Image (cartoon, rainbow, N blue to C red):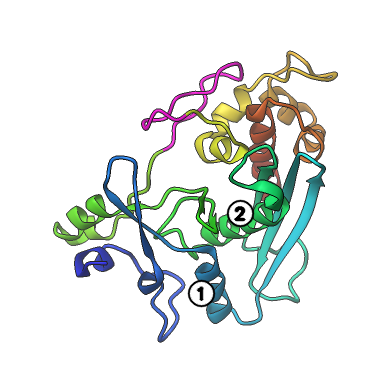
Amino acid sequence: MTENTMRSIPSINTVDGFNPAEFTRELMNDDGSMSLYLDVKYRMLWFRLHRPNGKIDTEIVHVDEKSAVVFCKLYSDRGDPAEQYLAKSYAQRFISQEKYGDRYLEIAETAAIGRVLAAAGYGTQFCGTADMLSGIIADAPVDMTIAEDTASGSVEASNRVVHQVKPTPQSIQENPVVPNKRKMTTLEDYLNGMTLEDAKNVVVDVGRYSGTKLGEIVMSNPKDLDWYVKYYAGKNLALKAGAILLMEAVTAKAS
């Protein structure tokens, strides 16, 4: 890591004697350029050092022989009430994806932990909204070339963090193509790529709400989205992701 790159990473959740930038590693992108990445284990170390009484609370929302969904909440203190959390996240992994093998539940939990830590500021300087385990990349590291360019510019520019931008799905019938020609094939892709407006426009294609947009459901009876979050296991990942994002938004607004 160059001195310019380290200067381009802003300070947040600082801990005396611990510099998370020193634990980042370089990953090669498809085009040969390099990116920075902070592994989940170091995000957890950072959190424990910063909040020694904090708590990482995971819950298995769904698991079967094909996939697992894990929900995670992050607390500043283990004694905090259930709804007084710093951040929360969901993650899903499938056994059908060869790279995950039979560890899909373990990796879903790790992904949820990585995402919730990033959402609370333990890793957002270096990555997007998910995580890595044993070489399995599930989020967007920081592009080193862009980081070094901003570091050599103005002070304002050096404080900006540049993440890889993921596209939003255009419809529930067709997965969009991202800039590197890869399609959105996992729930994580949709969770990272969808906006709330995208989520509202997803059309339900199963059950009593078939043909109805998620936005209409969230306005009339938001609790009905909980079924899609916890139990839906179909192929329409845009539907699952949209329900998760809208439920998170509703919960955050209520709290």
10 Å crowding of disc 1: few (<14), some (14-19), many (20+)? many
Q: Which residues are magenta?
A: 166-182
CA distance for labels 1 and 2: 16 Å
On the rendered structure, is 223 left or right of 131? right
Q: Name the residue at the right extreme.
A: 208
Q: Nearer the viewer, mark 1 or mark 2?
A: 2
Quadrant of residue 67 within the rendered picture: top right
The residue singled out by tag 1 in the image is 46
- Camera-nearest residue between 37 and 156: 37
Q: Amino acid at mark 2?
A: Ala
Image spot of residue 188 (x, y percent):
58, 41
Which numbered circle lies on residue 3?
none
Q: Residue at x 36, y 73 (%)?
A: 22
Which numbered circle lies on residue 111?
2
**SS under mark 1:** helix
Quadrant of residue 159 within the rendered picture: bottom left
